[in-house]
Image: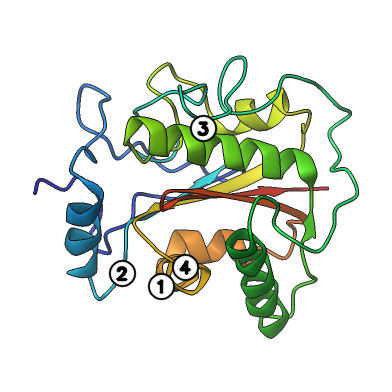
Amino acid sequence: MSNAFPDDGLPPAVSDDDFFPDSGDADGGSSDSADGEGRREAAATAEGEVKASESPEGGSGSSAGGDASAPGGSGSSGGSANAGSSGGSGSPGGSSGGGSGRTADVVTLANSERAAAGCEPLRVDERLTTASQKHSEDMAARDYMAHDTPEGTTPAQRATEAGYDAWSGENVAAGQRSADEVMDAWMNSDGHRANILNCDFKAIGVGEADGRWTQNFGWE
């Protein structure tokens, strides 16, 4: 299988500090068109990791592909998040990651890693969760893994459309079956780990659909 991702099997992370370059092909199309099983096998050859991607605010992180308002998902206007705006701060969050027990487990594991690194725990923001879940649903519905949609909608734009204007970073992944697997993949990739362990990040929202994972972060 052709693989445009780095040797660790993960497309680059993106965050607000320094947006990593797009890792898609020259035409901006997704390099991740193989079936899900093939993706897991290919990623597993890279030190046992599975494909993942992280993205900082200010740009896009991995191969382009798909649209966040995909059929079969719950995407809305302009991308994978509900339309809306806010003053840029996260709303009060609960203790889970939203949508499923697996996404809640990702939040728990991320906060455990942060505690070990001396960072404060992340607070779950419902708007980041909405943006993350809808992006995961779109990636699953249209069989791609990327930060930007083929139409060019970025993680920051999806967060803003969900009503959150303090977006700071995104990790995505495909093929993992559990919170432990996806966190292992992210923590074994420098860029993804940097997002998770950024002590300046304050909020998180996690989505998952058919093995497509999205983890968004916020400054407030």
Q: Using the image as rendered, state which of residue 151 and residue 70 is in the foreground.
A: 70
Between disc 4 and disc 2, the foreground one is 4
- Residue type for callout 4: Ser
* Distance between mark 4 and mark 3 Cα atoms: 28 Å
* Distance between mark 4 and mark 1 Cα atoms: 16 Å
Q: Which tag, 3 or 1, sits closer to the chain's start?
A: 3
Query: What residue is pinned by disc 3?
Result: 59
- Residue type for callout 3: Gly
Between disc 4 and disc 1, the foreground one is 4
Q: Which tag, 4 or 2, sits closer to the chain's start?
A: 2
Using the image, determine if residue 129 lies above or below residue 134.
Answer: below
* Distance between mark 4 and mark 2 Cα atoms: 13 Å
Asked whether the residues under the numbered discs 4 and 1 touch, taking CB atoms below 8 Å apart as contact, a structural biologist would say no
Asked whether the residues under the numbered discs 2 and 1 touch, taking CB atoms below 8 Å apart as contact, a structural biologist would say yes
Q: Which tag, 3 or 2, sits closer to the chain's start?
A: 2
- Residue type for callout 1: Asn
* Distance between mark 3 and mark 1 Cα atoms: 23 Å
Q: Residue 204: percent from the left, percent from the top?
A: 71, 53
- Residue type for callout 2: Glu
Q: Residue 15: percent from the left, percent from the top?
A: 57, 46
Query: What residue is pinned by disc 1?
Result: 188
- State the SS at label 1: loop
Query: What residue is pinned by disc 4?
Result: 178
Q: How is the image coloured?
A: rainbow
Q: Residue 39: percent from the left, percent from the top?
A: 23, 53
What residue is rendered at 40% in x and 39% in y? 140
Using the image, determine if residue 171 lies above or below residue 60.
Answer: below
Query: What residue is pinned by disc 2?
Result: 49
Name of the residue lying farthest toward the left: 1
Between disc 3 and disc 2, the foreground one is 2
Left or right position of 120 against 171: right
